[in-house]
Image: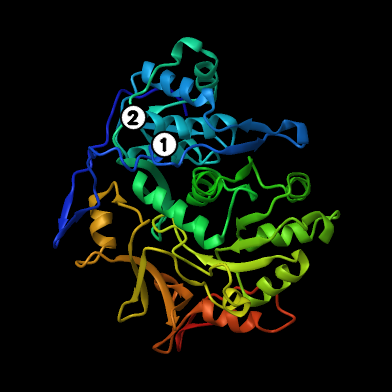
Amino acid sequence: MHWGRHHRGSVELHRQQRGSRSHLKLTRLDSPELHMTHAGLAPTWLQVDHSPSAASLSNIAPSDTRIHRLAGGLRTLGVRPGDLVSWQLPNSTEAALLLWACWQLGATAVPLHHRASAQEVDVMLAAIPDAFSITASETQHMIRTESALLEVVPPPYGIALILHTSGSSGSPKAVIHTHDSLYFKAQSMAQVHALGAEDVVLMPAPMAHISGILNGVTLVAAAGMRSVLMNRWDPERALALISAERVSFMVGPPTFFLSLLQTSGFTSEKVRSLRLISAGGTGVSPAFCEEISQRFSAVVKRSYGSTEAPTVTTSWAGDPSECMHATDGRATPGTQLRLSETGELQLRGDGLFAGYTDATLTAQSITADDWFCTGDLAQITDGWITVTGRTSSMIIRGGENISPTQVESILTAHPDVLQAVVVGLKDARLGQRV
């Protein structure tokens, strides 16, 4: 795909009335109080890993002049508060600087996955209004151009970020996050994880994912800590970075940590700095948590969230380890949970997305009383939540609903089973069988 600049476009997402509340499909707002770079949430120490050499780590410091210069360069190109700016880059110095420059200018950041094909990118861009598309070379040029440094007036807060996620249909959905939702989530997760200035996170998830944005950038700024961004997952390189950079916090799926164990150079000494591991996604069984906790000598806990609702449940610092391993935690600050009559988990509260750019999708996902329908099945016991599967993946055997996740949990409870996957097969008599 040819990456040039589209003509100037702004977000036209009008408010939608639902009951007594007016939200979702946002217009630009006029109050600057919660803008990310004007509410105590500003760039902190970021390091970007570009190659197998430790010397390749490049730093982005607080009040980095490159951010101001890049914001000025974007403004020279015609970008104004409320405009969309997209790029397709792996975790890199340019990507991190672009993110903060957009927010300083009041523009909406639209990072696209660096591995997306040209066809996938075309589909994603079709889901949003016209955007400025910026390349790495353009970014580098603006950073080097002293004349592009302009004094930027603090912009109004509003739409900070649009990320794309694949739904059950497989078509990408454009998810809207505001400055206040990202700010609130970053501050609350720093509290929940008990993170501070002495901590360091290793983040291989790209900034086109909510985990990369939250755990690699905004949470880091909220806690005043340091982040090491990897441009791709390489377990041997990750092991070296954990040891050299004294990484204390990691977030990711089980495959990250299992692959670390399988590296030829793994020793407990090399990961001794790790004190907290937050694991999410599929395959986070109690057996997995217990093994990783023992091998890494770290606190290991399960977390649950999505692009629309980042980290809405997890264990808090000081919670019992058995709850950390056997459940997906409890509600994070500002999050309300409930189960529908069918057992679907529904959410509302601070830190959630503001809606999709597609009004039809937004209407389909939000109830009349403003609860977000996650599409996930769950159980809640004494405030502790366990996600048991997807509503769309339910196996119906002889008229009985069977959750694949629940069966997988039973299988992985056996000491000889580390991971399990359960699927439904067609059956002439029962309809489906496990």
Marks 1/2 in contact by CB < 8 Å: the verdict is: yes
Residue lying farthest to the top in this orientation: 147
The answer to whether 339 is drawn above or below residue 362 in the figure is: below
Q: Which residue is mark 1?
A: 37
Residue 28 badge: none
Q: Which residue is mark 2?
A: 154
Residue 65: horizontal and vertical position, in percent? 52, 23
Q: Nearer the viewer, residue 237 or 155?
A: 155
Q: Kindly report the distance in space between the C-alpha atoms of the residues bearing marks 1 and 2.
A: 9 Å
Residue 334: horizontal and vertical position, in percent? 37, 63
Does dot 2 land on a helix, a strand or a loop?
Answer: loop
Residue 180: horizontal and vertical position, in percent? 35, 48
Does dot 1 land on a helix, a strand or a loop?
Answer: helix
Residue 257: horizontal and vertical position, in percent? 70, 60
Q: Amino acid at mark 1?
A: Thr
Residue 370 sits in quarter: bottom left
Left or right of residue 301: residue 128? left
Which color scheme does this rendered protein use? Answer: rainbow
| Res. 172 in view | no
User: Dot 2 surroundings within 10 Å: few (below 14), some, or many (20 or more)?
Assistant: some
Which residue sits at x=70%, y=65%? 298
The answer to whether 27 is drawn above or below residue 434 in the figure is: above
The answer to whether 170 is drawn above or below residue 389 in the figure is: above
User: Dot 1 surroundings within 10 Å: few (below 14), some, or many (20 or more)?
Assistant: many
